[in-house]
Image: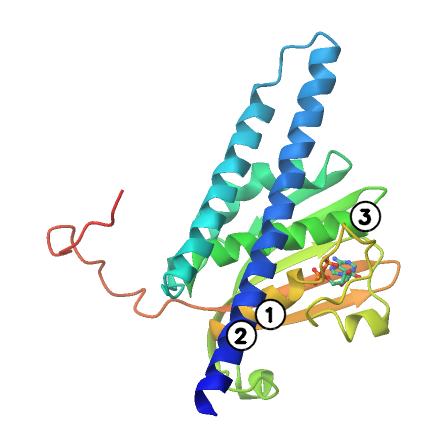
Amino acid sequence: TRAALFQAQKMEAVGQLTGGIAHDFNNLLQAIGGSLETIERRLAAGRGDIEPYVTAARTSIDRATALTRRLLAFARRQPLKPERTDLKALVDELRDLIERSVGEAVRVETRLAPELWPIWADANQVEAALLNLAINARDAMPDGGRLTVRGANTHLDEAAVALEAGMQPGNYVLLDVADTGTGMPPEVLARAFEPFFTTKPVGQGTGLGLSQIYGFVRQSGGCVRIDSAVGQGTSVKLYLPRHQGAEKAEPTPEKAPDQPPP
Ligand code: ADP
């Protein structure tokens, strides 16, 4: 029946969401663990310069709290809301956390075009995606390397979106997360977006990172593309729709009727 089908779809959505959140939560726990390890090492060596790592751990804990709130919000049937999101501010804010998540052997470079357009997407999801991609890049560079986060304004024409059902030609912001790691052989690349597909040992990979990113970006009206070469590295490109009406004046605070709850 229609109700049973709806129920099944709902259960599937709940499963995907909780799986995705568990995955993000795990990434944050790894970041906290990394900070604590450094703190322990420095304290054991009699060093007192631990403050940045305490701050990093605190930041990760705050993000984990935000994640569980998201789960609770879903349980209360509040759909995720896209919003006008400034990618540069978001990347700047996440940079320290990314650096600590990938470890000292990986050099992190950010290259964001000046005048980067604002995007129309759920900022929490973009953050989670960026963190997931950084962790994947780290896993692909066990001996270190370079992680480049690039942001650029781009136009996708009819031909460029032809293979993406429901996607419109137009203006997009490209968020490209590239590493100099192992790369993906064709058989891995072909399955990379599949939920639960992982090549990582049990306990390290859930196979939900890329599938969650794919789902969220497609739902936002964008698309994801992966370029990868074995032995050279991988570039994951998220095309996120430009925020429309960016040219118009922002509403003045007096005209905004509601203040968001604290
Ligand atoms: P997980 O990271 O938990 O395995 P993902 O869905 O994020 O799940 O990734 C699926 C698989 O795709 C990984 O197990 C890995 O084999 C491959 N992969 C993802 N990102 C990269 C990358 N940056 N470099 C090489 N392989 C990758």
User: Which residue is under mark 2?
Assistant: 218
Question: What secondary structure is found at the residue carrying circle 2?
Answer: helix
Mark 2: amino acid: Arg
Q: Residue at x 75, y 10 (%)?
A: 45
Q: Position of residue 52 (x, y in %)?
A: 57, 24
Rendering quarter of residue 223: bottom right
The earlier-in-sequence mark between 1 and 3 is 3
Q: Is residue 185 above or below residue 52?
A: below
Quadrant assignment, res 86: bottom left
Mark 2 and mark 1 residues within 8 Å of each other at the beta carbon: yes
Disc 1 to disc 3, how far (Cα)?
Answer: 22 Å
- Closest to the observer, 252 or 83: 83
Disc 3: which residue:
141
Residue tagged by mark 1? Answer: 214
Mark 1: which secondary structure?
Answer: helix
Q: Is residue 251 above or below residue 109?
A: below
